[in-house]
Image (cartoon, rainbow, N blue to C red):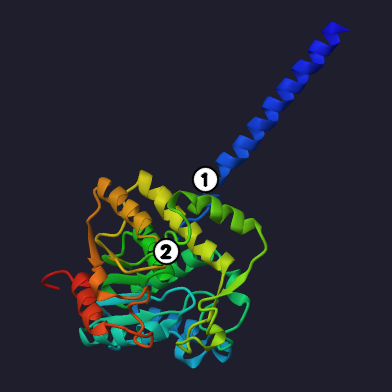
Amino acid sequence: MKQQNKTASSRRRWSGVLIIGIVLAIIASLFIPWNTWALSSKPHPLQSYEEAAKRIEVLRAERETEMNPDCLLQFLTHGQKVQHAIILVHGYTSCPAQYVQLGQQFYDLGYNVLIAPLPHHGLADRLNDEQNQLKAKELVAYADEVVDIAHGLGEQISMIGISGGGVTTAWAAQNRSDINTAVIISPAFGYQQIPTRLTAPVMNVTMVLPDAFEWWDPSLKENIGPSHAYPRYSKHALVAFLKLGFAVQLRSWQTPPAARRIVMVTNANDTSVNNALTSEVVRRWQRQGANIEAFEFPLSLGLAHDLIDPKQPNQSIEIVYPQLIELAIRPGE
């Protein structure tokens, strides 16, 4: 009888150890970003201006009747392949209208300019639920598509992206050696509302929970501007950018970025994205020997997270645009 009790006690003890081990393993797994290694770049660069222009025409016509006219693909062209092409990637819930003025300035400098809407962005129905369908793999495909097209537009390719578009540009910079210059502005590698070390577990848990929409401004709700941007965000869509950001971070541990030159731009007054995570990416790339420059807009400027769109309140584009153009253009170009 004593032996039986001892055996039962031993089984309970080992069962308890096993349960604790399983719980700890589950908790540990939450701190590892899920399913990021499945993302991969698949370049198919176009060979001529005519081929690129035709592809742009097709992309612009896709879902044209459902789009806000201000959010259609923007193509500022000199009518032929030129020395420099630039891709401008807007932020989450915005659209190509965000970049129209800055794009015009690059056009005036001789660039062919491509501003394509991110997947599920720019719809005329600002309160659509479709944005929650956004997936990291779609952002990867988008990045490949615009860089492939840019081959037909310019001998040298530059890419600028902000926020979610900044993460998309960072992915392209990590994977595409045909990018001459990548300017990554306030990338959404993490959000200020989430402590840095909890970003991965929050992302993983959010992915498996039902989606939820939140107002960017709960007091203004759908009355918030600008009129070309969505007034709500989807938590699942935010996770898509985080997932892509983690894919960049994981690769940055192992390989240097492929882009020939990178400029990382942060905003000391940014209350949306986690600049500490951005700094970690910069340090990893530096350790990999990347040609990377870091620039920060000072706190004293009081810039908003979206420092590009002239239709956002309290903008200082007379300061921001010249600085970004200077950062994007190599001396002598």
Q: For the residue marked with disc 1, what is the amino acid?
A: Ile
Identify which residue is drawn at 40% across, 79% down.
51
Q: For the residue marked with disc 2, what is the amino acid?
A: Ala
Identify which residue is drawn at 29% across, 66% down.
268
User: Where, quadrant-wise, is the C terminus in this rendering?
Assistant: bottom left
Q: Quadrant of residue 148?
A: bottom left
Percent of width and height locating residue 290: 25, 52
Quick one: SS at disc 1? loop
**Residue lying farthest front?**
219
Q: Name the residue under label 2.
A: 188
User: Mark 1 or mark 2, which is nearer the start of the sequence?
Assistant: 1
| Residue 63 visible to an observer of this rendering | no
Q: Quick one: label 1, few (<14), some, or many (20+) residues within 10 Å? A: some
Q: Mark 1 points at which residue?
A: 32
- Is 17 situated above or below 324? above
Q: Nearer the viewer, residue 262 or 239?
A: 239
Q: Is residue 272 left or right of residue 66?
A: left
- Spatial separation of the CA atoms under disc 2 and disc 1: 18 Å
Q: Residue 244 carries which label?
A: none
Quick one: SS at disc 2? loop
Q: Quick one: label 2, few (<14), some, or many (20+) residues within 10 Å? A: many
Q: Which of 238 and 219 is in front in this view?
A: 219
Q: In this view, does 91 lie to the left or right of 200?
A: left
